[in-house]
Image (cartoon, rainbow, N blue to C red):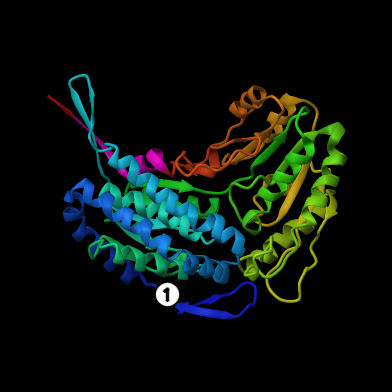
Amino acid sequence: MIEVVNPTTEEVIGTVRAGTVGEVDAAVGRAVAAFPAWAATPVEDRVDAVRRIADGLAARADELAATMVAEMGTTSAFATKVQVPNPIAIARAVADVVAGGYFDGERVGHSLVLREPVGVVAAITPWNFPLQQMVAKVVPALVAGDTVVLKPSELAPLTADLLAEVVTAAGVPHGVFGLVHGTGPVVGEALAAHPMVDMVSFTGSTRAGRRVAALAAETVKRVALELGGKSANVVLDDADLGRAVKIGVANAFMNNGQACSAWTRLLVPADRHDEAVELAAAAAAKHVPGDPALPTTRLGPAVSAAQRDRVVGYIRQGVAEGARLAHGGPDAPTDRGFHVAPTVFGGVTADMTIAREEIFGPVLSVLPYSDEDDAVRIANATVYGLGGAVFSADEERALAVAKRMRTGQVDINGAAFNTSAPFGGYRQSGNGREFGRFGLDEFTEVKSIQR
């Protein structure tokens, strides 16, 4: 059995069965058997099933939010405003795309080009946005006519159980959706390597993504990877510095700093570096670690003791390499729970470890730049390319800089997240896209018929 630990209280709050290779094989077998009938199900019926899933999630919103607060430490406010509403919006948007004629086909000369289901999909999902990442894979796969075997993170498995109940209640036939709990080295690798799985959609670390891709390559599976990030928030010299820093700190610390697309590098003009560090430290001081179940708490714990220790190790590394600690530090801010102090470093250079590697905790690095070209150079000086931001008084200038950034998403002046726009990264942040029409493309094959 796998014990589920509340990262705030450090108490065991549940258990799930650790799946075996044999159970993976059985789940894949059921998915293979169920595929022909599900793929042949009228598109309208699949759309209706997905809409029932979205409605089911909405009906259990409070329970889903409370479960995520308890098992992975996201704050109550973030759970109710983001962790639950986003997946519902993602599901409804995908249903709308399909209902709008996605599978009708298009003419290309004398060819009819069609979209068809890819087959059996293995969905391997993370703990930081458990419901969102499960829905972003399971829902487009189901509406496309694929069958799915889901392996959620063993750190946040209880949310997956609730999703499974919602999918069953929505009338999805037996075998079309399967859930196997377990660890990555056992269940995850068995799914990635399984000869009857046609596609693997994985979200997690870049290291684990490389392993998934290598295993899947043995049977030439389709692979979609959403991996790590080290996103830059570029504040141009004409921007409202106070506003940009305030929004930037909130983004860097969202979900307790455990977000792959968080803007963890704040790039500011060199002559305003010290002012920016001071503003960032003041903003970070308002993110007081506490009980995430309380509605006023802005910063909860790391998901586990191991994750806390990893983040603290990076903070110590930053100090050792000469970055200036402006707020926070490695010391535990609470007596109980896997909390990390919200931390701001100034005087960071692009070659420092804290500026190059994904930390996945509430740690912000402030880097000075000399001019706009230097800012773009620093922003792109990473193996990642998932998210980013630009702040400027001139939106066209900001857009020009955004176009030069080698990353999958860029937000200008704090623009809101869009659950219908494509989400995914460049380089070692992965390949493929999620959400809306672009996400749906990943779960379909393209066929051309000439006549």
Q: Is residue 115 left or right of residue 373?
A: left
Q: What are the residue bounds of the magenta stretch? A: 436-448
Image x and y of residue 75, in percent: 62, 63
Q: Nearer the viewer, residue 88 or 161?
A: 88
Residue picked out by circle 1: 18
Numbered disc 1: secondary structure? loop
Residue drawn where x is 65% and y is 73% of the image: 8
Q: Residues within 10 Å of mark 1 (few under 14, many from 20)?
A: some
Q: Is residue 365 magenta?
A: no
Residue at far front of view: 59
442 is within the stretch colored magenta: yes
Q: Quadrant of the N terminus?
A: bottom left
Is residue 136 positioned above or below 401 on the image?
below
Q: Where's residue 314, x and y in %?
A: 73, 56
Q: Residue drawn at (71%, 76%), measured in percent from left and top? A: 336
Q: Nearer the viewer, residue 56 or 158?
A: 56
Viewed as shown, does residue 23 lie left or right of 325?
left
Three-letter amino acid code at disc 1?
Ala
At 22% from the left edge and 62% from the top edge, which residue is drawn?
173
Residue 397 shows in this picture: yes
Residue at the left extreme? 451
Quarter of the rendering containing residue 190: bottom left
Residue 57 % position (x, y): 41, 61
Q: Residue at x 30, y 53 (%)?
A: 142
